[in-house]
Image: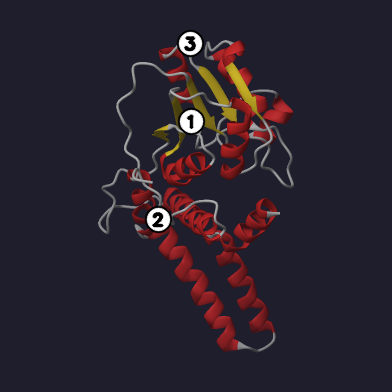
């Protein structure tokens, strides 16, 4: 239920969709002669689009998430590498049988690089299908084709294909892997998602070393930075979604702090 509610709510509140709904509401209000309501809806939609695409708000919201867990030195020995799903285009791959990556594809690439660097480490791909309407393969279904192409043997892979969100990533991976005391596991996911992911794995009793990838900000964005509207709209959308996710997970008791960090 949590998964479906979060998907439906996010559909309505993400900046571009919210602006469209406000414009539609303004249009309906204008048709019924409610000029003030029409003006309010149109103005709010305009402000949302301007702030999301032309202001540094998105990068400024996302950067603290990306900086929360700096990448540590690599340990000498690694027993396993966990890469969280969400980086492969499941709808396309289901039809075409390839391994097309989306904007979070760095996760899979980095996991393959680490797998080559630590040739005895197991590689866990955690991620089922997250598509509600389009359908598609989960990352754990597609990843074996990608890793084979990148030279990582199939017998090193552990596939967790049931999870649909980060909470289930942590719980199902813990149940599948059953890590032993003293083992070293790297957790690979987007830097902006690392605070939530690390907190969830800790809560599930799976000790990991965070290995953030897929950075979306340089940390130097500011008022004078020339924006690329499409890019900044995506960054703003990602930032808002992640902060909402952190808040929802904290309020539901799935994580212990609203902004988890290296200290807990």
Q: How crowded is mark 2: few (under 14 residues within 10 Å), some or many (20 or more)?
A: many
Of callouts 3 and 1, the N-terminal one = 1
Please tell me the numbered disc located at residue 107. 1
Identify which residue, 54 or 116, lies in the foreground: 116
Residue 17 occupies quadrant: bottom right
Instruction: Judge whether 199 appears above or below 249 on screen.
Output: above
Q: How far across and how far down the image is residue 103, in percent?
A: 50, 37
Left or right of 139? Residue 238 is left
The secondary element bearing badge 3 is classed as: loop
- Cα–Cα gap, marks 2 and 3: 40 Å
Which residue shows up at 49% across the image and 54% down it? 246
Which residue shows up at 30% across the image and 26% down it? 73
Q: Nearer the viewer, mark 3 or mark 1?
A: 3
Q: Nearer the viewer, mark 2 or mark 1?
A: 1
- Check the image and tell me how it is coloured: secondary structure
Instruction: Judge whether 244 appears above or below 102 on screen.
Output: below
Residue indicated by mark 2:
58
The secondary element bearing badge 2 is classed as: helix
Number of callouts: 3
Say if mark 3 contacts mark 1, CB within 8 Å.
no
- State the quadrant of the N terminus: bottom right
- Cα–Cα gap, marks 2 and 1: 21 Å
Instruction: Judge whether 111 appears above or below 168 on screen.
Output: above
Q: Is residue 189 visible?
A: yes
Which residue shows up at 56% across the image and 88% down it? 36
Residue indicated by mark 3:
120
């Amino acid at each position: 239920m949590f998964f479906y509610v979060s998907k439906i709510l996010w559909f309505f509140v993400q900046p571009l969709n919210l602006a469209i709904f406000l414009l539609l509401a303004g249009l309906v209000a204008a048709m019924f002669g409610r000029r003030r309501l029409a003006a309010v809806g149109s103005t709010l939609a305009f402000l949302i689009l301007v702030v999301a695409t032309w202001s540094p708000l998105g990068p400024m919201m996302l950067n603290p998430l990306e900086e929360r867990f700096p990448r540590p030195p690599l340990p000498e020995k690694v027993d396993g590498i966990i890469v969280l799903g969400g980086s492969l285009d499941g709808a396309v791959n289901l039809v075409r049988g390839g391994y097309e990556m989306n904007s979070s594809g760095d996760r899979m690439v980095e996991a393959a690089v680490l797998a080559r660097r630590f040739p005895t480490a197991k590689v866990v791909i955690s991620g089922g299908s997250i598509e509600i309407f389009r359908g598609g393969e989960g990352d754990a279904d597609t990843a074996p084709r990608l890793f084979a192409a990148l030279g990582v043997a199939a017998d090193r892979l552990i596939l967790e294909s049931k999870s649909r969100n980060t909470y289930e990533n942590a719980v199902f991976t813990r149940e599948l892997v059953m890590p032993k005391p003293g083992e070293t596991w790297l957790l690979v996911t987007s830097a902006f998602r690392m605070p939530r992911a690390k907190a969830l794995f800790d809560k599930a009793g799976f000790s990991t070393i965070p290995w953030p990838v897929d950075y979306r900000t340089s940390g130097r964005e500011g008022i004078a930075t020339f924006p690329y509207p499409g890019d900044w709209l995506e960054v703003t959308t990602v930032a808002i979604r992640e902060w909402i996710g952190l808040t929802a997970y904290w309020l539901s008791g799935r994580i212990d702090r609203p902004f988890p960090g290296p200290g807990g």
